[in-house]
């Protein structure tokens, strides 16, 4: 199984290591034709505005949008979550998301770099909690119809969604690749098994 990792910015190596641990082949994506013959795609963290601009310069935006709109398996973490959100509440005028996840997010909603933190995130299915690393993390402010919450962070006694899924798209506010927890990558591969490679 071949899993593309958008390699314009972000934790490409760490995502590749997770994919490799699960027995799949990681493929770095920098050009539109590199998306051919993939089974799944990872949109890693980084700076969401910069990634948005690089998508235009590289010619990748249209290919990624077509991939997501076709229901192909996609995991977006941190800035990747912002790219997948149908609504970005505080985006810059020159920043455009790809869409695909029926949610509204706020960039850096948990605070800027100096407010980065680690926390235990509760899995909605009652499974083992995630040890989550939040770095300039986006905050999911609205979950719309058709979206399932997979994990929540409890803040002052109130649970907030931090991992969501809709169709074949998974979005995550934190960095699972930095904690060495491969469950979301495994879920991506499970989704890929139900689809046909392009």
Image (tube, rainbow, N blue to C red):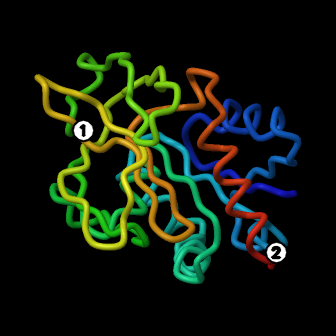
Quick one: quadrant of the C terminus? bottom right
Q: Residues within 10 Å of mark 2 (few under 14, many from 20)?
A: some
- Residue at 66 percent across and 38 percent down: it is 12
x then y, percent, for residue 190: 72, 56
- Residue at 67 percent across and 37 percent down: it is 15
| Residue 44 sits in quarter | top right
Quick one: quadrant of the N terminus? bottom right
Q: Name the side, left or right, on which 2 lies relative to 15.
A: right
Q: Name the side, left or right, on which 68 lies relative to 85.
A: right
Which residue does the numbered mark 2 point to in the structure image?
197
| Residue 37 sits in quarter | bottom right
Q: Nearer the viewer, residue 70 or 155?
A: 155
Circle on res. 33: none
Which residue does the numbered mark 1 point to in the structure image?
108
x then y, percent, for residue 28: 75, 50
- Residue at 73 percent across and 56 percent down: it is 4
Q: Earlier in the sequence, mark 1 or mark 2?
A: 1
Residue furthest left in the image: 156
Q: Is residue 43 above or below residue 125?
A: below
Q: Nearer the viewer, residue 52 or 118?
A: 118
Q: Residues within 10 Å of mark 1 (few under 14, many from 20)?
A: many
- Label pair 1/2, CB-CB below 8 angstroms: no
x then y, percent, for residue 118: 38, 16
Foreground disc of the pair 1, 2: 2
Asked which secondary structure carries label 2, the reply is: loop
Asked which secondary structure carries label 1, the reply is: loop
Q: Name the side, left or right, on which 58 lies relative to 33.
A: left
Question: How far apart, in angstroms, are the residues tagged by discs 1 and 2?
Answer: 34 Å
């Amino acid at each position: 199984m071949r899993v593309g990792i958008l390699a314009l910015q972000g934790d490409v190596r760490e995502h590749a290591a997770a994919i490799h641990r699960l027995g799949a082949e990681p493929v770095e994506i920098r050009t539109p034709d590199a998306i051919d013959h993939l089974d799944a795609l990872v949109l890693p963290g980084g700076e969401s505005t910069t990634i948005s601009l690089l998508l235009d310069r590289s010619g990748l935006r249209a290919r990624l949008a077509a991939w997501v709109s076709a229901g192909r398996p996609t995991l977006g973490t941190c800035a990747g979550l912002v790219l997948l959100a149908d609504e970005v509440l505080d985006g810059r005028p020159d920043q455009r998301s790809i869409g695909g996840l029926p949610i509204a997010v706020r960039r850096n909603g948990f605070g800027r770099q100096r407010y980065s933190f680690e926390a235990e995130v509760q899995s909605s299915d009652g499974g083992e909690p995630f040890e989550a690393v939040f770095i300039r993390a986006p905050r999911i402010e609205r979950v719309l119809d058709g979206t399932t919450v997979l994990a929540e962070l409890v803040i002052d006694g109130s649970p907030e969604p931090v991992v969501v899924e809709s169709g074949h798209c998974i979005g995550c506010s934190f960095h699972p690749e930095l904690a060495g927890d491969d469950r979301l990558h495994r879920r991506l591969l499970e989704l890929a098994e139900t689809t046909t490679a392009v």
